Image (cartoon, rainbow, N blue to C red):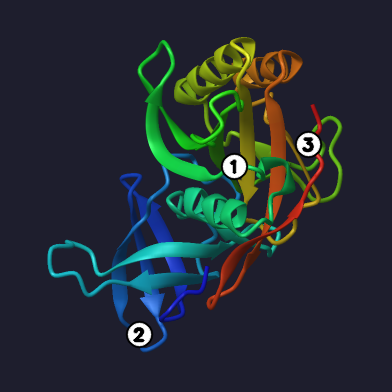
Amino acid sequence: MILDPPLQQGVFVKRYKRFFADIDTGDGERLTLHCPNTGSMKNCLVAGSPCWYSRSDNPKRKLPGTLELVTTEKGYIAGVNTSRPNQLVEEAVLNGVIAPLQGYSRLRREVRYGLENSRIDLLLDSPEQPAAMPCYVEVKNVTLEADNGLANQTDGLLLFPDARTTRGVKHLRELSAMSAADNRAALVFCVQHSGVQAVAPADHIDPEYGAALRDAAAVGVEVLAYRCELSPEKLAIAEQLPVLL
């Protein structure tokens, strides 16, 4: 994903009311930006650290831009705009970067499915082959660094979720049901973090999600994780990562 114009650099000040973030620009201006992230953003909020943001010239927007990249407590770069992962995974699927999700002729977004009135992030299928198994793909953004001393910690371990998520557990139930009904189902952890080496469930934050993730994998849901390249000029899926269940 080429960012044109490139992201602008500022200094992070604070996040508040969940969807607002204040930053200082290079010329001394203080801006209030949209912060599109429903999680806690734990370990990602460091006052006085470098951050990057996109500007908008849309006159209908109340805020002048969006917080995109931040510097974490350990000095890594993390992508906090949770609208980006679906775009990044879609682009990677279409460009052949995510090998396990190749072989389909059609990709659709936000398709209703399941018994709990859900929408799947991406639905892959081949209408010209009625017998072909469709693939339901759910995408999650990952930015949480493992705390020092956490059991089974490895250097570069990233965790999901960063806050309790009943919605995320619901998505895993829906994927499990799709897999049980002889469809393909996949969960893709899109890791917008420059220091990642592996991904694992954050059991200490949401044990219900961790249990649901392992149950989903046990019934055939494919759990995939990919590292992203992050820069002010470009965001892109780079390489597959191990998932530690």
Q: Nearer the viewer, mark 3 or mark 2?
A: 3
Horizontal and vertical percent position of residue 193: 66, 57
Q: Which mark is residue 209?
A: none
Q: Which mark is residue 243?
A: 3
Using residue 208 as the reference point, say whether residue 51 is left or right of it: left
* Residue drawn at x 83%, y 30% as measured from the top left: 151
- Return the residue found at the far left: 60
* Residue drawn at x 41%, y 41% as measured from the top left: 109
Horizontal and vertical percent position of residue 94: 57, 55
> Are discs 1 and 2 less than 8 Å apart at CB?
no
Q: Amino acid at mark 2?
A: Gly
Q: Nearer the viewer, mark 1 or mark 2?
A: 1
Task: In this rendered view, identify the residue nearer to me: 55 or 102.
Answer: 102
Q: Label 1: which residue? A: 104
Q: Can you say whether 68 is above or below 120 in the image? A: below
Q: CA distance from mark 3 to mark 2?
A: 42 Å
Which numbered disc, 3 or 2, marks the residue that appears first in the sequence? 2
* Residue drawn at x 18%, y 62% as measured from the top left: 61
Q: Label 2: which residue? A: 28
